[in-house]
Image (cartoon, rainbow, N blue to C red):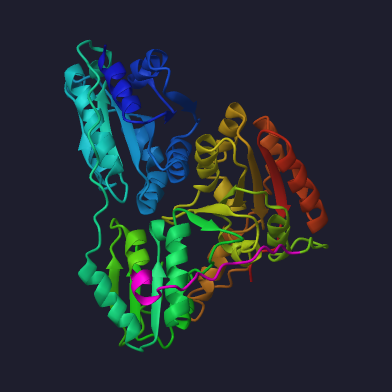
Amino acid sequence: MNGAEALLRTLVDGGVEVLFTNPGTTELHLVGALESVPEMRGVLALFEGVVTGAADGYARIAGKPAATLLHLGPGLAYGLSNLHNSRRANSPVVSIVGDHATFHTAFDPPLNSDIAALAGWLRGPVRRPEDAAGAGPDAAATLAAALEAPGQIATVIMPADVSWSDGGAAAAPVPPRPASTVSQKVVTQIADVLRGGDTTALVIGGTALREAGLTAASRIATATGARVLQELYSNRVERGAGLPAFPRLGFYPEQVLEQLNGVDRLIVAGTKAPISFFAYPDQPSLLVPQGAQTHILAEVGQDAVAALVQLADLVAPGTTAEVTGPQRPALPTGALSLQNWADVVAALLPERAIIIDESVSSGTALAAATAGSPRHDVLMQTGGAMGDGLPLAVGAAVAAPDRPVVALVADGCVMYTASALWTQVREQLNITNVILNNHAYAILRQEWSHFSNRPGLASPDTNPLFDLTNPQIDFVGLANAFGMPASRATTAEQLADQFSQALAQPGPHLIDATVPPAA
């Protein structure tokens, strides 16, 4: 067994089933090893940002890591943007990066770079076997590190001669360190806070946004009157009829401060106290009301769900959760608007759908519209780096081929990783891509309004750098170029018809939905 085979066999024995890749010359022996390790499915992408975003989406739905295989430092650099999003989502990813042969790097060939420094930016462990015998043990340790709660990106750098040399052997899986539990003392202290009569808010995130955590939070709110809010960007939220639904924290500081107005005590579970996404003049960075006390029930990486359940049993014994009843909007009519496109999706959303939400400024009506739709999951872009939506859809569809995936992606975001459409076609993934096309960088126009009273800023409506109409992007033609069926909708009736048809047919589809920019 050579080093490449030892690496892949170790990962397969540890439960890894998928390798997303855009390989190069230094990775050829790893590509060849896929033939001797057929349990590992190789999925090709044309751009590294699709590779890394797909691994993120896969991990969020499968609940376990995929591996990525990238070409040297420049390949890793191309993939870093969505690895950043993965890090913020706490997604477990095994990142394999090929390197020059150990004896070749001393000559500083053109593609030579400090791969360890690039990988270290992701704050996860980095390993580099120096011979084939080390490939298996390093793979096992890397996988265990990726799975360490709450999940992280763990990197193994594979020199080409380590991959091609004999002397490798599969290593036994290394058990990952589980999530730490919250002490009973902390739970009891938080229960006392809730019983104290002060106005209290509970902000939940991470795994607490799935059924068990949502149910416990609802019981707590019902019994104590605490306001429950979910973190702004979450890696996975379970939503729909039969589940409790809570509002998300707002994007802008003034929105969050209004949501928390009058709060004396803020409890956080599975996330951090709210902060502003960006800094703005005369606005605070920490968005906890002045004078309010923050209490941590569960840190990120601790078992927030178990802590919430224990807390609910203390303060809300016998209390049942308040859940959302089944309710869909009526199918709307007329020209597409920021409200009615969401109503169309909510009215027609199938059972067990996976929504990818990178709708940015066009998606403000989505959560309310889909609250009573059949149960579904929502994956969000978590780190603020645009271009995650289409790759997340690839990974989610690979992880759950029996579930329909609906990717709701803003037009500007599409262009970062448009080649994900090619991978969707190649793998015949059941993805309905709805491109929310407002022909503008509307989010930047919104941001501009927060600085409009500053000197030197002209109107965002006249700034050509926010305009995407010159030239207009033909998303239907773009999809067709990748072999994907596509259509264009300008009315709610057209969107409903095209959305229904796309869901009814196997394979990927694209709908270019023309919507107005947010005010």
Residue 281 visible here: no
Q: Is residue 231 above or below residue 154?
A: below
Q: Nearer the viewer, residue 314 or 59?
A: 314
**406 sits left or right of 206 in the view:** right
- Quarter the C terminus occupies: bottom right
Position of the N terminus, as image quadrant, is top left
* Image coords of residue 245 (percent x, y): 54, 67
Q: Which residues are magenta?
A: 311-329
Q: Residue at x 82, y 55 (%)?
A: 493
Check residue 13 for magenta coloring: no
Task: Give how far across and how far down residue 514 sits, in percent.
Answer: 72, 55
Count of marks, rendered view: 0
Task: Tell me which residue sits at (45%, 42%) in the image.
Answer: 53
* In this view, 275 is above or below 115: below
At x 40%, y 50%, the residue is 85
Left or right: where 233 falls relative to 26: right
Q: Nearer the viewer, residue 359 or 217?
A: 217
> Seen in the image, is 91 located left or right of residue 482?
left
Q: Residue 181: image x %, image y %?
A: 25, 58
| Place of residue 404 in the rendered image (x, y in percent of width and height, measured from the top left) | 62, 42
Question: Is residue 20 in view from this perspective?
Answer: yes
